């Protein structure tokens, strides 16, 4: 039987080998000089405070690239098509190393949100979820009213499916005119998937919410998200599957309680991680560059610190060591590992961690 020390040594060696193989990959982010962004309010960073960073700002910070952001609040796929006709945008795209696109949400969700807001105002609800949690009798409502409301929401969310998909395909075709750029498309997430206290609902109301939520996801996936997948496959673009990343966590990654479909700071951080992983870059705390900050990153830092502490040259690449130095004291050591673990725990708890 192996001793604990032998087991530990074997585990350490396995981790070192895995980390060493990862560190041999070239960093594509080093070649990114110009990033151009087109899209909607998510790409524009709406609903963030001055102290919070959008995913566009985070990606720009990670890569050190010049960023030109032509995204605007409320932009639909048609607005982006119009944007692509502007000479200034075309000139920027011609010089771009990376083109980031985030659009399609407003096409599908604006009619839905308008109908939901109409219902909230009519019956005096304070939050979107009140219709599912409230005592309906207090608002002179019954379960039939809830069923009718669900039907109205379904009709609203399906109203723009075809034009949104067609416009998305056209956007993809037009971006093919810039073959020197790496095009990354972020698909549309479901901003109502899911309310935080879903399991507290009665079975009937939970079914009602789940029906609406599923309809929104199916509509997004059958329209703009399908078009994004098709144009990416046809033109060699890359897709960030934000829809899957946000699934089940709208209460954390979206301002759902305010009936605002824009992403929170935590949501932006998650999108940035996904994009940065595609670019091969590093980010603070993401030591193994897998797009997440978790215990594996802390473990990698500890292995590196143990190696350097015993006179070795370390197990991290220069880029990984930079990402590991979260307290910015010039070294990657156990203090950084501890901060990474705390950050990961806070991310899992409330979605709003800080390195401070």
Image (cartoon, grey):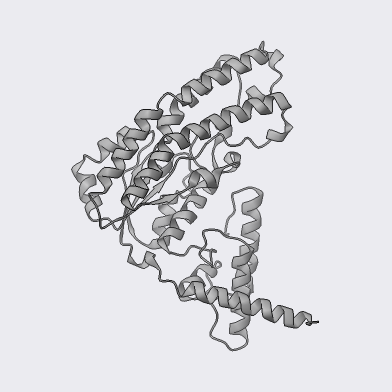
Near-viewer residue (190 or 297): 190
**Rendered residue at 62%/58% (across/down):** 344
Q: Which residue lies furthest to the bottom in this view?
A: 311
Where residue 27 appears, as percent x and y from the top left, is 40, 68
Q: In the rendered image, is residue 266 in sight?
A: yes
In-image side of 75 versus 14 (left or right): left
Against 127, residue 188 (above or below) is below
Query: Is there any visible trace of residue 117 in the rendered image?
Result: no
Q: Count the marks: how many?
A: 0
Question: In which quadrant is the N terminus drawn?
Answer: bottom right
Residue at x 60% of width, y 72% of height: 300
Instruction: Report whether 154 appears left or right of 228.
Output: right
Picture layout, residue 235 above or below residue 133:
below
Q: Which residue is drawn at 31% across and 44% down?
A: 172
Give how far across and how far down residue 31 sits, in percent.
33, 66
In-front residue for pair 330/69: 69
Q: Which of 189 and 349 is in front in this view?
A: 189
Quadrant the C terminus occupies: bottom right
Residue positioned most to the right: 1
Q: Which residue lies furthest to the top in this view?
A: 140
Q: In this view, does 231 lie to the left or right of 58?
A: left
| Up/down of 142 relative to 5, above or below | above
Residue farthest to the left, as pictured: 87
Q: In which quarter of the image is residue 29?
A: bottom left
Q: Position of residue 202 (x, y in %)?
A: 73, 26
Find residue 74 and report its horizontal and vertical position in percent.
38, 33
Give the quadrant of residue 279.
bottom left
């Amino acid at each position: 039987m192996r001793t604990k020390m032998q087991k530990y040594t074997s585990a350490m060696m396995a981790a070192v080998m895995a980390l060493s193989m990862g560190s041999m990959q070239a960093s594509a982010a080093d070649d990114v000089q110009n990033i151009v962004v087109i899209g909607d309010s998510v790409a524009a960073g709406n609903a963030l405070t001055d102290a919070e960073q959008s995913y566009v700002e985070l990606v720009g910070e990670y890569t050190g690239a010049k960023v030109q952001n032509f995204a605007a609040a409320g932009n639909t796929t048609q607005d982006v098509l119009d944007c692509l006709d502007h000479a200034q945008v075309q000139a920027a795209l011609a010089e771009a190393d990376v083109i980031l696109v985030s659009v399609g949400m407003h096409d599908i969700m604006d009619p839905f949100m308008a109908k939901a807001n109409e219902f909230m105002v009519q019956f005096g609800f304070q939050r979107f979820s009140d219709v599912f949690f409230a005592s309906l009798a207090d608002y002179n409502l019954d379960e039939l009213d809830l069923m009718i409301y669900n039907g109205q929401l379904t009709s609203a969310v399906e109203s723009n499916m075809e034009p949104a998909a067609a416009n998305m395909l056209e956007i993809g075709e037009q971006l093919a005119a810039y073959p020197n750029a790496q095009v990354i498309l972020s698909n549309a997430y479901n901003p109502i998937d899911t309310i935080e206290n879903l399991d507290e609902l009665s079975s009937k109301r939970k079914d009602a919410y789940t029906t609406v939520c599923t309809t929104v996801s199916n509509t997004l996936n059958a329209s703009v998200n399908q078009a994004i997948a098709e144009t990416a496959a046809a033109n060699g673009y890359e897709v960030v599957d934000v829809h899957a990343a946000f699934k089940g966590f709208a209460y954390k990654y979206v301002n759902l309680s305010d009936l605002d479909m824009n992403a929170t700071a935590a949501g932006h951080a998650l999108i940035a991680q996904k994009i940065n992983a595609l670019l091969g870059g590093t980010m603070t705390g993401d030591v193994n560059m897998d797009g997440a900050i978790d215990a594996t990153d802390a473990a990698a830092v500890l292995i590196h610190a143990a190696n350097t502490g015993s006179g070795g040259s370390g197990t991290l690449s220069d880029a990984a060591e930079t990402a590991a130095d979260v307290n910015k004291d010039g070294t990657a050591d156990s203090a950084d590992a501890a901060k990474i673990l705390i950050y990961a725990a806070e991310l899992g708890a409330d979605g709003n961690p800080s390195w401070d």
